[in-house]
Image (spheres, helix red, strand yellow):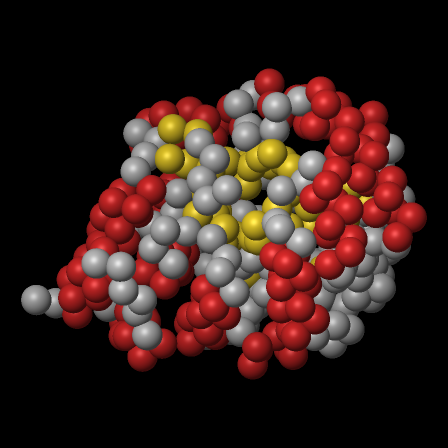
């Protein structure tokens, strides 16, 4: 029996692969690895595909120095737009637009280290309005908030909190110096204590190696994360990582396949940078990934909901909320 088959049997029997076992997948034959990951996905999640969209609820002028981000005030990119927290009407209108197109999950994302208490209260009002008028799950990605803020947001009707770990603890120091890995972990733990589900993954192509990717996967697994966004860096001019080489299809497929082995019942979610892949990410959806952020990303154009819905049908998937 090959190493891949052995590990596949282990996870299908309910076991967890160790760090050492995950490291063996870095050089494993790609097609066999991806086929095994797809088999795990089918056995664990059937043909369910978790499709969500995001709205940039507050844009730009960010105090933080995340080296991949066009919204950081530390860098000069073509992104010149900035605006404060959007009013309820705008956030509500987008929620309706998405729900009408079959999207089941909608995430409100804001720039900055964290929303202020006043902004949290304003957003709670918007969330209440959406819950009254639209049938859609609400996620929030609002920076490094604490348990009390999350309790308010949960009470208003948000069910999930997103906060990406971005990379391994070792490599995160190369990515951002204005906040810490530990603060991110504390944010996710606080959201959990407030009764919300958590979503956390990272960005591939920041200059990290495969070991860092695996360590990030192990971190989110240890926190009980079941929704794992997998972004591919868009090296836009002006950010410190502007000269990084984008991932190719094969590397992207290996990433999602390994994450599937690490978190067999998770929603391995393609996120930003999907459109940069030669196959627009299609190969990943038969290599362990069964979720995606559809539509535009925060500062870059994405793949439309209509295009994604057609692709899901072609691949035999059905849009469904997974890992609530
Ligand atoms: S990723 Fe978020 S916290 Fe970091 S610079 Fe961009 S908007 Fe700010």
Question: Residue 275: x and y, percent?
Answer: 52, 43
For this view, does 260 lie left or right of residue 185?
left
Numbered marks: total: 0
Which picture quadrant has residue 238?
bottom right
Query: Which percent across, then down, holds residue 18?
Result: 32, 74
Q: Which quadrant does ligand 1 occupy?
A: bottom right
Residue 263: in sight, yes or no?
yes
Q: Does 271 appear above or below 112? A: above
* Residue nearer the viewer, 143 or 255: 143
Q: Which residue lies furthest to the left in this view?
A: 1
The residue that appears at 12% across and 67% down in the rendered structure is 2
- Image coordinates for residue 157, horizontal then vertical, percent: 69, 36
**In the displayed structure, does residue 233 sit left or right of residue 282?**
right
Can the viewer see residue 253 in this picture?
no
Q: Residue furthest right?
A: 118
* Residue at 83% across, 53% down: 115
Q: Is residue 176 depicted above or below 48 in this figure?
A: below
145, 163: nearer the viewer: 145
> Which residue is found at the position 70% from the left and 28% from the top?
131
Considering the image in quadrants, where does the N terminus appear?
bottom left
**Which quadrant would residue 53 be assigned to in this image?**
top right
Question: In front: 236, or 126?
Answer: 126
Position of residue 233 in the picture relative to residue 57 (left or right): left
Q: Position of residue 72 (x, y in %)?
A: 79, 60
């Amino acid at each position: 029996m090959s190493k891949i088959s052995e590990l596949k049997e282990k996870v299908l029997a309910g076991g967890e692969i160790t760090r050492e076992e995950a490291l063996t997948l870095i050089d494993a034959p790609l097609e066999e690895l991806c086929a095994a990951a797809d088999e795990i996905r089918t056995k664990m999640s059937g043909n369910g595909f978790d499709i969500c969209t995001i709205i940039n609820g507050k844009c730009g002028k960010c105090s933080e120095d995340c080296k991949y981000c066009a919204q950081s005030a530390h860098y000069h990119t073509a992104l010149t737009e900035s605006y404060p927290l959007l009013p309820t009407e705008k956030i509500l209108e987008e929620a309706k637009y998405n729900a009408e197109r079959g999207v089941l999950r909608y995430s409100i994302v804001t720039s900055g280290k964290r929303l202020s208490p006043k902004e949290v209260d304003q957003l709670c009002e918007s969330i209440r309005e959406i819950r009254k008028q639209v049938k859609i799950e609400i996620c929030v990605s609002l920076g490094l908030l604490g348990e009390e803020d999350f309790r308010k947001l949960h009470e208003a009707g948000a069910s999930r909190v997103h906060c990406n770990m971005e990379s391994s603890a070792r490599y995160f120091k190369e990515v951002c110096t204005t906040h810490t890995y530990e603060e991110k972990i504390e944010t996710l733990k606080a959201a959990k204590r407030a009764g919300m589900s958590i979503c956390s993954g990272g960005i591939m192509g920041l200059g990290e190696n495969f070991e860092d990717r695996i360590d990030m996967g192990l971190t989110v697994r240890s926190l009980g994360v079941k929704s794992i966004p997998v972004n591919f860096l868009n090296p836009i001019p002006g950010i410190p990582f502007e000269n990084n080489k984008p991932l190719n299809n094969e590397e992207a497929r290996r990433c999602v396949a390994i994450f599937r082995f690490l978190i067999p019942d998770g929603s391995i979610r393609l996120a930003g940078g999907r459109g940069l892949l030669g196959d627009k990410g299609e190969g990943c959806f038969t290599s362990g990934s069964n979720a995606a952020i559809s539509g535009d990303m925060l500062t870059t154009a994405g793949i439309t909901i209509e295009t994604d819905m057609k692709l899901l049908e072609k691949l035999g998937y059905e849009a469904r909320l997974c890992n609530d």
